[in-house]
Image (cartoon, rainbow, N blue to C red):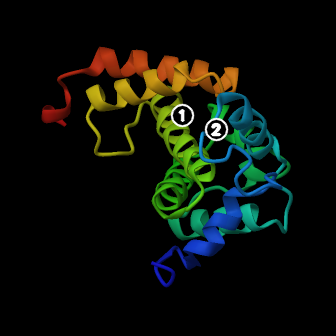
Amino acid sequence: MENESIHGLRLDQLADVFSIGTDDPDPAGADGHDEKMAGPLREQLSCVLPKGSLLFDALIMMMGRLGCDVRSLAGRSLLEVLLSPHTDIGLLQAIKDCGKRLSAGLDSRMEAAMATTIYYAALASALVHHQRKITQYSYDALDRSFTTFAAKKWIAPELATLFQRAGGICRDKRGTDASQ
C-alpha cells in the first residue's frame, strides 16, 4: 500500500498531512480513551493552514486538479474549512478522499479515528452546506454514523452540531437513495 497514491501523494505523505498538530503519534494508547482523543483532535482541527505547509500544499494540488477555488484555505484551520458554508465542494471532496485513504492505512488507532472523523466531517459539511451527498453510503447508513460521531465525548462541540444537522438531513432523505 506504500506505493499507492491519491492525487500524487503517497500514503505516508497523506499521513503527514493529517498529523499536523499531533506531537505524540498514539497518545490514547490502545484504549482510545475519550479524554485522550479530545485534545489531539482539537489541535489537529484548529491548526491554521499556512501557505507552504504539507496540508495546504496537498489540498492546493488536489483542488487544482479538480478545478476548485483554493483561496478559501489561506490562513484557516481545518475546522473552519469544514464548518464554513462557503467551502468549495471540491475541497470537501479532497478532504474526504484524504481521510478515507488515511483511515484505512494508519497503524495508530487514534490517528485512524481522527482520519475517520475528518472523513465523516467532510461528508457532513457537504450535506449541510451544499445539500450534496459525496459518498455512496445510504442516507440511513450516514445517519447512523453521524449519530455515533455526534455522541462521542471527544468530538469538538462544533463538529457534534455539524454531525447532528447532517443526521437530520439524512433522516429527511431516507429512502431516496434508490431514486438518485
Find residue 82 and name its label.
2
Image position, residue 125 (x, y; %): 54, 34
77 vs 5: above or below: above
* Residue 120 visible to an observer of this rendering: yes
* Residue 86 visible to an observer of this rendering: no
| Nearer the observer, 149 or 170 | 149
Q: Name the residue under label 1.
A: 125
16 vs 103: above or below: below
Find residue 19 and name its label.
none
The three-letter code of the residue at mark 2 reads Leu
| The quarter of the displayed image where residue 167 is located | top left
Quarter of the picture containing the C terminus is top left
Q: 129 left or right of 80?
A: left
Q: 129 left or right of 76?
A: left
Tell me which residue sits at (51%, 81%) in the image: 2
| The quarter of the displayed image where residue 61 is located | bottom right
Image position, residue 143 (x, y; %): 36, 24
The three-letter code of the residue at mark 1 reads Ser
How much space separates mark 2 and mark 1, taking CA atoms?
6 Å
Disc 2 crowd, CA 10 A, few/some/many (<14, 14-19, 20+): many
Image position, residue 49 (x, y; %): 81, 53
CB under 8 Å between discs 2 and 1: yes
Q: 180 left or right of 126?
A: left
In the structure shown, which secondary structural element does the residue marked by tag 1 occupy? helix
Image position, residue 73 (x, y; %): 75, 51
In the structure shown, which secondary structural element does the residue marked by tag 2 occupy? helix
Tell me which residue sits at (60%, 40%) in the image: 31
Mark closer to the chain start, 2 or 1: 2
Tell me which residue sits at (28%, 21%) in the image: 173
